[in-house]
């Protein structure tokens, strides 16, 4: 086979591999994780055995407290899914169903939804009530969790 022909075939395979890898990246990104009270105590903070806040995770996280029937929660869900893809290597995204995880909702005083808990690696978490625009959530993640200054 001619060297130029080998080069063309090899180039075709490299380009194909690159395109496949590029298309698969969103599928490999981390999705929002549904978390139980027990998992929260294992991964985030064991409020039964610890007096002072001490985050157990290695990456900051966002916890969306929601219910299945809540309209604003349904509008927030695709935003959280999109951001979980965008920040997949930097921030972990969780969802906690307040009707199933009543103890967890009680611990954080969740009495209206949606509420989102932003947990930095170091320091105290921040709990915000209500539905915020995506741009505002991105700003909170960048500035509060990732400490990027604009």
Image (tube, rainbow, N blue to C red):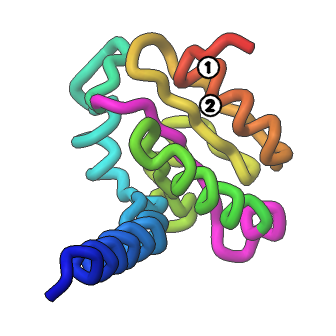
Residues rendered magenta in the picture: 58-74
Q: Label 2: how many residues lie within 10 Å, few (<14), some (14-19) or many (20+)? A: many
In terms of image quadrants, where is residue 22? bottom left
Q: Secondary structure at mark 1?
A: helix
Instruction: Quote the CA–CA distance across marks 1 and 2.
Output: 6 Å
Q: Please give the residue where the numbered disc 1 appears in the rendered image.
A: 144
Could you say where residue 140 lies in the image, as x and y percent from the top left? 69, 28
Q: Residue at x 53, y 56 (%)?
A: 85
Q: Please give the residue where the numbered disc 2 appears in the rendered image.
A: 141
Name the residue nearer the viewer: 93 or 98.
93
Is residue 62 within the magenta segment? Answer: yes
Q: Which mark is residue 28?
A: none
Is residue 16 within the magenta segment? Answer: no
The reply to whether callout 1 and callout 2 are in contact (CB within 8 Å) is yes
**85 is higher (above) or lower (below) than 21:** above
Q: Secondary structure at mark 2?
A: helix
Q: Is residue 20 left or right of residue 50?
A: right
In terms of image quadrants, where is residue 78? bottom right
């Amino acid at each position: 086979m001619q060297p130029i022909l080998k080069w063309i075939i090899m180039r075709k395979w490299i380009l194909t591999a690159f395109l496949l890898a590029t298309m698969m990246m969103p599928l490999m990104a981390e999705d929002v994780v549904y978390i139980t009270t027990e998992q929260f105590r294992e991964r985030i903070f064991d409020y039964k055995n610890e007096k002072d806040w001490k985050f157990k995770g290695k990456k900051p996280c966002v916890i969306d407290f929601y219910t299945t029937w809540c309209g604003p929660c349904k509008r927030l869900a695709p935003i959280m899914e999109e951001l979980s893809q965008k920040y997949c290597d930097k921030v972990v995204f969780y969802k906690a169903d307040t009707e199933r995880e009543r103890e967890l909702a009680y611990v954080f005083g969740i009495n209206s939804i949606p509420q989102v808990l932003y947990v930095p690696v170091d320091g105290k978490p921040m709990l915000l009530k209500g539905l915020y625009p995506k741009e505002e959530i991105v700003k909170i993640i960048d500035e509060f969790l990732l400490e990027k200054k604009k």
